[in-house]
Image (tube, rainbow, N blue to C red):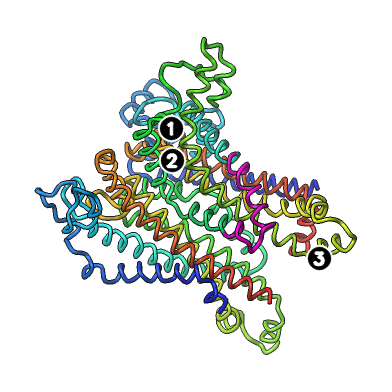
Amino acid sequence: MSNVLFRYTNLILVTLFILSLLSFLLAYLFPGQAIENLTGLRIDELTELQSSQIKYAVDGNMFIQYWHYMSELFAGNWGVSFSSGLPLYEDVSYYLPASIELSAYALFLSFFIGLPLGFLAALRHHRLTDYSLLSISLLGYSVPVFWLALISILVFSLQLGWFPLSGRISLVFEIPKITGFILIDILLSDSIDKHAALIDAVRHLILPTFSIAIVTTTLILRITRRSVIETLNSEFILAAYARGLTPRQVLMRHGVRNALIPILPLLAMQFPTLLTNAMIVESIFSWPGIGNWLIQAIYQQDYPAIRAGMLAVSALVVVFTMSIDLSIRLTDPKRRRVERVAI
Amino acid sequence: MEFKNNHIAVVGLFCFAFFLIITIFCPLLAPFDPNMQQIGDLLIPPAWDLNGGISHLFGTDALGRDLLSRIIYGCRMTFGISLLLVLIAMLLGVSLGALAGMSTGFRSSVLNHTLDSIQAIPTLLIAIIIIAILGPGLVNSMWAIALALIPQFVHQTRDFVRRELSKEYIMAAKLDGASQLHIFARSIFPNMGEMLVVQATLALSVSILDISALGFLKLGAQAPSSELGAMLLEGIEVAYIAPWTIALPGGALFMMMISINLVGDGLRSALRNRLLH
């Protein structure tokens, strides 16, 4: 077990190292001066600063530069944005939680709908329920997410007026930022009308969350269905029936747990898709998240922001997927054995 | 054989063929030039609407361009480019995957880890980085998507090669003194066709979504172009008075995705059933 832990920590560190190196090299690949792209300060401001006795390691070779870049990165000094002039670290720590919040709710919702429906489809395999669920799920993962978001804005916001068009919360409410997650912040804040603020925030959340969740739900449904069908066809299920258990007992005692195990790693692989969809949906609903922020940064050619945002998002994805992988490896003895044989 | 019995998948295949025909013969099929602006005919509703006319079957957009012609040309761009990208990605991915599968030890481990980390990064993020380096535009977004499609081909090829290598017919070829290259080219590659077709349909749907998403975000194909995503973006400005300008291009995109996914699903389950029996 400690062996597995060690190998995974190693893997995560190496990957993060590659990503940080990449983000450093990006400063050289982007148009303009590398030093501008790294700090976010214009070259004339820099010479001004340099004359006021702040030293830069620009004269050293690449390795020394990288070393200094990393030490600044860990000090929380990520440079400033070209367009707004604000420190990037604060920008990212404001926008990233909004994205995580949106994706987390979408993921939770898809689990809530997708898993039971997947089980239902598998248990009614090759019957009407199965076929209709499969057809609906085909529609669900074929729909382009930005089109769906546009249509839902057109129908629910403009025609029916049920939900607000964009943003995170009505400007009437002033919520101090504590954790960055709006619902938690509302609960923590001592604003006058907590109840109304909560309802307003949820109303803002509904459309974007559903737009993202539809694709993920159908994916979860299909993965669950396949896994349950495969589990129910295996021999230990037959053995359980032979021992005289009822179908219900077989499913509860042997089916559910064994079917759920292979689902998790497949779901971890869907995380990048979820994030891509979230980034697109954010920019449609003007959700103040990292995807919207990055896309705005491209329009404004804000290279320091792209570099910092890319590093933050990819590090998040890598750490998330690898920790899911690790937890599966630690909890599932079957998988470990198979892996050992494979190696 | 299995595929033929799956009627829905066959319908999907016909839709797929329909889009292929549109892609190839679009100049013959489109009634108007997609960029011709008719000042007198702004925002005409589709033919089935009370105010619509028969000369513009799908109506016109805010600049008086015929929507049917634009959608036909848009299908050509989105669909044709995606096909091209998938072919490129397949070519590169299979050769890299073969390399990773046939090699062992340190080299394969480095290759695998690099690929795993690339696959973990969202496509859109890769596209954003490449576009930031090269600047927005259709060709640059194509590079980005091709790069993002390669890893899954590499993965599949590598796993397939690993699986096949442990089988007995490969052992027989080895005993006959075949070289590594010979084993791959003569023994493994001919068996890969089905796996590749299934993987290609998956990649095709991903690439269509990505091309149109980038066009929609103003990062890919730019405004006057009739790429479906870019058309949707243009439609937003008049969406409230002319909903058909976003409903129809999006619907075409939706149809395209459904047909590809139907074919892909059918192929996958046919392949799975054959492996079982």
Look at the numbered disc 1 and give the secondary structure of its residue. loop
| SS assignment for the magenta stretch, majority | helix
**Front residue (pair B198, B122):** B198
Q: Do labels 2 and 3 share a chain?
A: yes
**Front residue (pair A233, A128):** A128
Which subunit holds the residue at mark 1?
A
Q: What amino acid type should be assigned to the residue bearing mark 1? A: Trp
Direction left: furthest residue: B40
Q: In which quarter of the image is the C terminus of chain A?
A: bottom right
Residue A161: where, in percent of width, then height? 38, 30
- Magenta highlight range: A109-131
Q: Hey, which quadrant is residue A157 in on the image?
A: top left
Q: Is residue B65 left or right of residue A44?
A: left
Residue visible at 51% across and 48% down? A215
Identify the residue position indicated by label 1 in the image.
A287
Which subunit holds the residue at mark 2?
A
Residue A118 shows which numbered tag? none
Identify the residue position indicated by label 3 in the image.
A235
Q: Cα distance, mark 3 to mark 1?
A: 49 Å
Residue visible at 49% across and 31% down? A205
Q: What amino acid type should be assigned to the residue bearing mark 2? A: Val
Q: For the residues labelled 1 and 2, say whether their Cβ atoms are less than 8 Å apart.
A: yes
Identify the residue position indicated by label 2 in the image.
A281
**Front residue (pair A164, A331):** A164
Sequence-first tag of 1 and 2? 2
Direction right: furthest residue: A243
Direction bottom: furthest residue: B176
Sequence-first tag of 3 and 1? 3
Q: Is residue B78 left or right of residue B186?
A: left
Look at the numbered disc 3 and give the secondary structure of its residue. helix
Badge 3: residue crowd in 10 Å (few <14, some 14–19, many ≥20): few
Q: Cα distance, mark 2 to mark 3?
A: 44 Å
